[in-house]
Amino acid sequence: MSDWLIGLEGSAAGHRAALFLALSAAVLHAVFAALQKGRFDPWLSRGAMDGFIFLIALPVALFLVPWPQGVQWLLIIGALPIHFAYKMGVALAFTRGAYTVVYPVVRGTGPLFAVIGAWLIFGEVFTPVQWLGVAILLSGIFGLAVYNLIHVDVGRATLVSALWLAFATGGLVALYTTYDAYGIRATPDPFTFLAWFFLVTAVDFPVLATLRYRSMAHPPPLRALLARGLTGAVIAFGSFGSVMLATRLDKVGEAAVLRETSTVFAALIGWVVLKEAVGPRRLALMGLIAAGAVIVEMGG
């Protein structure tokens, strides 16, 4: 499997595979985030998910993939603080704002910084048409933020702080996207990086969630929480794993931008599943974000 995947790097087939993986990551990440924001406290949901991610990744890392060597250990361990900061930002933002308010800003802010990082680190260059797509994507993001600031009534007291947290967390998305792309490219076997990445970055939130659960006067039913955690863990492997493989096969910047079509799926999930009011204007702005991502791909 690893040899076949490595053989696709830099080829037309690799580009098509990266496109499919990035779009798959978009759908799966929107579902993953909805599971974290949905029924339970976001801290508890992420802790339950990470707990199962750790349990599933442990035998894979120990017995099914080659172990990291030398500097590869440093690259894997270095992912821990970056992803911990990102998860903290998401949890804090979700406790202050609605899913359809926070998620598009978090996911939409990241591509601009990821594109810049890909240029600085990997020497990737965007065409003028692709930069037009980035501009359209950003106009949708900032338009959505302004619209929410003016019109959203639910959670009004914490809306501004939720948006600031969402923007900051978007910067962390770009940071981990670029870092993870560097790490998976620097590891000869990509599945070595993936298995150990999931194992190492899942050790923190289960501890925080356990402490939070024990301190609650009325904690949620443990069985239902664990069921959501298992579901989210399985989706996480598909979401984060897909986009990292996409950045190994093709351009980091394009994969990062295409993944943010997740905002459209987030709108649908927020409206249909979480029963959050979306409205035609917010839906159009989310569609603008996705349209910008498509132009980036078409203009490459």
Image (tube, rainbow, N blue to C red):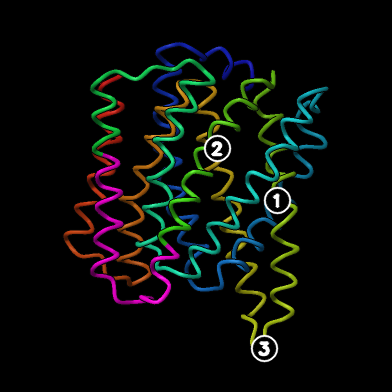
Q: Which mark is residue 202?
A: 1
Question: Where residue 191 appears, x then y in whole percent?
Answer: 67, 29
In the image, residue 292 lies in the stretch drawn in magenta: no
Task: Determine the residue positioned at 48% across, 24% down.
Answer: 118
Task: Determine the residue positioned at 54% across, 64% down.
Answer: 92
Question: Where residue 112 appears, x then y in whole percent?
Answer: 39, 35
* Residue type pointed to by label 2: Leu
Task: Determine the residue positioned at 53% across, 57% down.
Answer: 90
N-terminal-most mark, 2 or 3: 2
- Chief SS of the magenta region: helix
Q: Nearer the viewer, residue 23 or 164?
A: 164
Spatial CA distance of label 2 from label 1 is 18 Å
In the image, residue 155 lies in the stretch drawn in magenta: yes
Task: Determine the residue positioned at 38% across, 52% down.
Answer: 105
| Callout 2–callout 1 Cβ contact below 8 Å | no
Q: Is residue 132 above or below residue 260?
A: above
Quadrant where the N terminus is found in the figure: top right
Q: Residue furthest left?
A: 280
Magenta range = 137-162
Q: Nearer the viewer, mark 2 or mark 3?
A: 2
Name the residue tied to disc 2: 175
Name the residue tied to disc 3: 217
* Residue type pointed to by label 1: Ala
Q: Quadrant of residue 57?
A: top right
Question: Where residue 273 appears, x then y in whole percent?
Answer: 36, 67
* Residue type pointed to by label 3: Ala
